[in-house]
Image (cartoon, coloured by chain):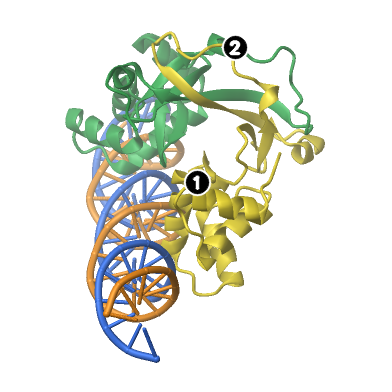
Chain colours: A green, B yellow, C blue, D orange
Amino acid sequence: MRRLTQQDLDQLARSRGLNLTPQRRAIVDFLHSASNHPSAEEVFAEVNRRFPMTSRATVYNTLNLLKAAGLLHEVFEDGVSRFDPVLDPHHHFVCRACGKVEDVDREIMPAPAGRKLLPGKQRVETYEVTFRGLCAACGGRAEQQ
Amino acid sequence: MRRLTQQDLDQLARSRGLNLTPQRRAIVDFLHSASNHPSAEEVFAEVNRRFPMTSRATVYNTLNLLKAAGLLHEVFEDGVSRFDPVLDPHHHFVCRACGKVEDVDREIMPAPAGRKLLPGKQRVETYEVTFRGLCAACGGRAEQQ
DNA sequence: ATCTGGATTTAGAATTAGTCTAAATTCGTT
DNA sequence: AACGAATTTAGACTAATTCTAAATCCAGAT
């Protein structure tokens, strides 16, 4: 799954009317360097290690701004929001043993051809799939539960 | 989508080692009578109207027990858990205008034949699809946003 | 009928994620 | 250097959920 370069991001952000302050860049950087869909609290903790005195409010504001600008996606899992910087539409896999959230290529389950209207007359604009089971690591260990 | 009768439920609960006390039954009943995936707080409010003095802890405990016993599913949307008593596997549609969550038959998007192992070696046990867009009611009104 | 122990429920305290607020800071423009 | 808009800050606040310790319920043994 494609990750954007710093330049791409800067330009993209600028083009959507969002200027990247140092704090905002630190947040974006961390999200792009992380592989495991961090929660807001994790972003807060890590960004503070790297760039002390970044307030919680800034982290939440920035995450919301980035989301609104379409620069990241929000995934709810297990009662917390997690954030995902991969922009190409894609799906997720959640491990029931360790809780890890992994990205899954969209072509594993493509849109049903030409289906824009569901039987209940709902107009579909996007969709996402959540697969659940055991990740490679947990599946390897003796079957749990 | 099939709803279970009181008898079915009782038996099902019993068979999974969960005895249905009056409070628990009230919660199950309300969930089955509701059409809109109530949140825990809504369950608490409504069950209390019907059966006063049911504590919040009991509502949350019961919801968790029922979930563990496989008698309902949890759906996260917009930062809150909502509960869904429909047991047949199915998908969801979320309206971006009014936020309503509707059930969608699974055959709209069936499992990719024989796909149990994803390319990342994850073992898939279940999956669910969330469609997003405008529901029939909101889609009817002049396009929003 | 009474006792007893385990399961359940209760009220409310505690925790946690997230939002809000008002003051301070930054920064581009004059 | 001064101004104003945007941003950030610390901390108060809110809402959802979990935890806790005491009270209640109930089935089986006496």
* Residue at 21% in and 38% down: A53
Q: What percent of the width, then of the height, locates residue B119?
A: 43, 8
Along the viewing direction, whichever of C2 and A116 lies nearer the viewer: C2
Q: Which quadrant would residue C7 be assigned to in this image?
A: bottom left
Q: What percent of the width, then of the height, locates residue B13?
A: 52, 51
Whole-angstrom CA distance, mark 1 to mark 2, is: 31 Å
Q: Earlier in the sequence, mark 1 or mark 2?
A: 1
Q: Is residue B24 above or below residue A142?
A: below
Q: Which quadrant would residue A33 be assigned to in this image?
A: top left
The answer to whether residue B30 is left or right of residue C13 is right
Of the residues shown, which amino acid type is indicated by label 1? Ser
Q: Chain of mark 1?
A: B
Kind of element beneath mark 1: strand
Report whether mark 1 lies on the same chain as mark 2: yes
Of the residues shown, which amino acid type is indicated by label 2? Ala
The answer to whether residue B102 is left or right of residue B68 is right
Question: Dividing the image into 4 quarters, which one contains the C terminus of chain A?
Answer: top left
Residue behind mark 1 = B81
* Residue at 18% in and 31% down: A49
The answer to whether residue B101 is left or right of residue D29 is right
Residue behind mark 2 = B113
Q: Chain of mark 2?
A: B
